[in-house]
Amino acid sequence: MADLPPGAAELVSEVERITALPGDATDRVPELLTVLHRLVPYAGSVMQVLNPERREFEMLGEFGYGEPTLAYLRSSEYYHEMELLGMDRDRPPMCLRDAPVPPAELASWAEHLEPAGFREGVGITLFTPDGRHLGLLSLHTDDPAYPSDAARDFLGMLTPLIADAVDPMRSLVTLSRIVADAQAGVVLTRAGNVLSIPGLPGHPLLAIGSAVLEVAAASLTEGSGYHSFLCPHRPAGGTEGHVRITVLPCPTSTPIHLLAMVLTSPAGDLRGLTRRELEILGLLVDGWSNQRIASRLVIAQRTVAAHVEHILSKLNAPSRTLAAVRALRRGLYVPRLLARSDR
């Protein structure tokens, strides 16, 4: 490795300070880029987070580029170019002079960056310690003397700190603490995939393609925010019971492909409601009549009416409409898709 650049200790301290700041990555990125300018006097800088489902990068912060260049940097063609250069792997920072192909063969350089006046640059792939590919930091200069070998190698030392600063899971972990007794959880993506939440295990109910995730996604599609409901569950070697499912929409500041956190926790106080009453409450939440409920559950209407009376008493509600509202607000119901009678 080349000698450390001047002021290396101060730069490390500054990057550590910024990485430790609370809030979202969008708040930390401008400060990071300002500090990195002391190391690499760039004329253009862009911090991008990966959208693996669209195979594109999303802008988290940028400076010094025209709109045509930014449009290309957002495109799947640019992502594919970075793949060809090996910038989708956890590797040391790479300057333009280090590229395995001539710059003239790179569309990003030949058609966008060089015509805009850039003469060198360095790309830094951002990975977490657990192997998640977060994105890419690029710094472009108008002087071929920069970045120096020392600055390039020093950026490699700073990369773990920079990755931590832009990791969207940091804010999601903080948000997950709203559910103080959460026992498991995943992040649901818009394509129906799931990502692990650091510090929380997964759960069989939260596997890809599960009915729970389908209900969770539907609740967000309908415009709901924070949402909670119950799911029947029999743990291995245990007895039949319920698990509480909480759906927390991802903040708008997180990458767009992240949809929501889905967490499991103990069911809590069920107000004495039985399994059947919780299922009927799910149908009341959907606005079903007694006749329709009876037909679905293959029971007599008078039996449904008796269940509804018990529900009204247990929820201290004078009407089925108010019972449905209270059940929805408190998460005291089993959605139709999760009812045992339906599975």
Image (cartoon, rainbow, N blue to C red):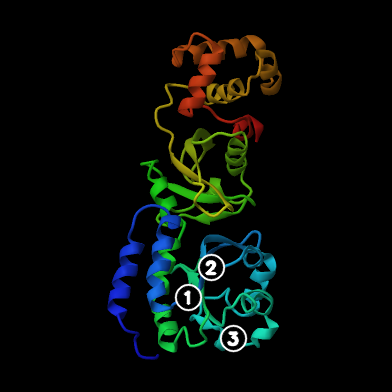
Q: CA distance from mark 2 to mark 1?
A: 9 Å
Image coordinates of residue 95 in percent, x first then y, are 53, 83
Badge 1 or badge 3: first in the primary sequence: 1
- Classify mark 3: residues with Cα within 10 Å, few (<14), some (14-19) or many (20+): few
Q: Which mark is residue 214?
A: none
* Image side of residue 221 versus residue 138, left or right: right
Q: Quadrant of the C terminus?
A: top right
Of pointers 2 and 1, the one earlier in the residue sequence: 1
Residue 184 or 256: which is nearer the viewer?
Answer: 256
State whether residue 252 appears in this view.
yes
Residue 191 picture location, percent across and down: 64, 52
Label 3 – label 2 distance at C-alpha: 22 Å
Q: Is residue 274 visible?
A: no
| Residue assigned mark 3 | 99
Element under disc 1: loop
Residue 270 figure quarter? top left
Q: Residues within 10 Å of mark 2 (few under 14, many from 20)?
A: some
Q: From the viewer's side, name the closer residue of 1 and 38.
A: 38
Q: Amino acid at mark 2?
A: Gly
| Kind of residue sitting beneath label 3 | Ala
> Looking at numbered disc 1 in the image, what kind of residue is underneath it?
Tyr
Numbered disc 2: secondary structure: loop
- Do residues under tags 2 and 1 come within 8 Å of each other at their CB atoms? yes
Residues 220 and 314: in front is 220
Would you name the residue on which mark 2 appears?
Answer: 64
* Cα distance between the residues tagged 1 and 3: 19 Å
Q: Which residue is mark 1?
A: 42
Dividing the picture into quadrants, the one containing residue 340 is top right
